[in-house]
């Protein structure tokens, strides 16, 4: 699998910001992290939800999804900045 080292380093960075990986899936290989998100309907924070996913395609392409309603804005911008700096494609929800 191409780019497994890039996936590992990026996962390590995301974990340093959000904590441990909480779930993984295959085909394509994806890791997920949780965090607090804003519940717009109740105008407060909700329970923990998936806030970031990192995917490695079969062709070795990394892509990252970052929730835009995270309570921790510093973490959200750190993840977006990392993806931008390292040319990791960002997935839109």
Image (cartoon, helix red, strand yellow):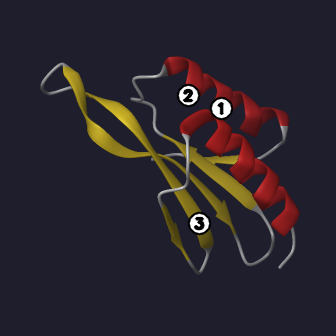
- The residue positioned 73% from the left and 48% from the top of the image is 12
Place of residue 39 in the rendered image (x, y in percent of width and height, measured from the top left): 22, 29
Could you say which disc has been placed on residue 76 in the image?
Answer: 2
Q: Is residue 84 left or right of residue 49?
A: right
Q: Which of the pair 81/23 is nearer the observer?
A: 23
Q: Quadrant of residue 15?
A: top right
Classify mark 2: helix, strand or loop. helix
**Mark drawn on residue 80:** 1
In the depicted structure, whether residue 49 falls above or below residue 54: above
Q: Which residue is mark 3?
A: 30
Q: Residues within 10 Å of mark 2 (few under 14, many from 20)?
A: some
Query: Marks 2 and 1, Cα distance to the nearest angstrom?
Result: 6 Å
In 3D space, how far apart are the residues under numbered discs 3 and 1 (Cα atoms)? 17 Å
Q: Could you tell me how far apart the alpha carbons at marks 3 and 2 are, in whole angstroms?
A: 19 Å
**Residue at image point 34% right, 45% down:** 49
SS assignment at label 3: strand
The residue sitting at 73% across, 78% down in the picture is 58
Disc 2 vs disc 1: Cβ atoms closer than 8 Å? Answer: yes
């Amino acid at each position: 699998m191409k780019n497994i080292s890039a996936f590992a380093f990026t996962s390590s960075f995301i974990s340093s910001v959000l904590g441990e990986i909480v779930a993984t899936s295959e085909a394509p290989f994806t890791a997920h992290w949780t965090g607090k998100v804003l519940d717009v309907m109740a105008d407060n924070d909700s329970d923990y939800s998936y806030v970031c996913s990192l995917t490695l395609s079969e062709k070795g392409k990394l892509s990252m999804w970052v929730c835009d309603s995270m309570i921790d804005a510093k973490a959200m911008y750190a993840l977006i900045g990392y993806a931008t700096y390292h040319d990791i494609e960002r997935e839109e929800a």
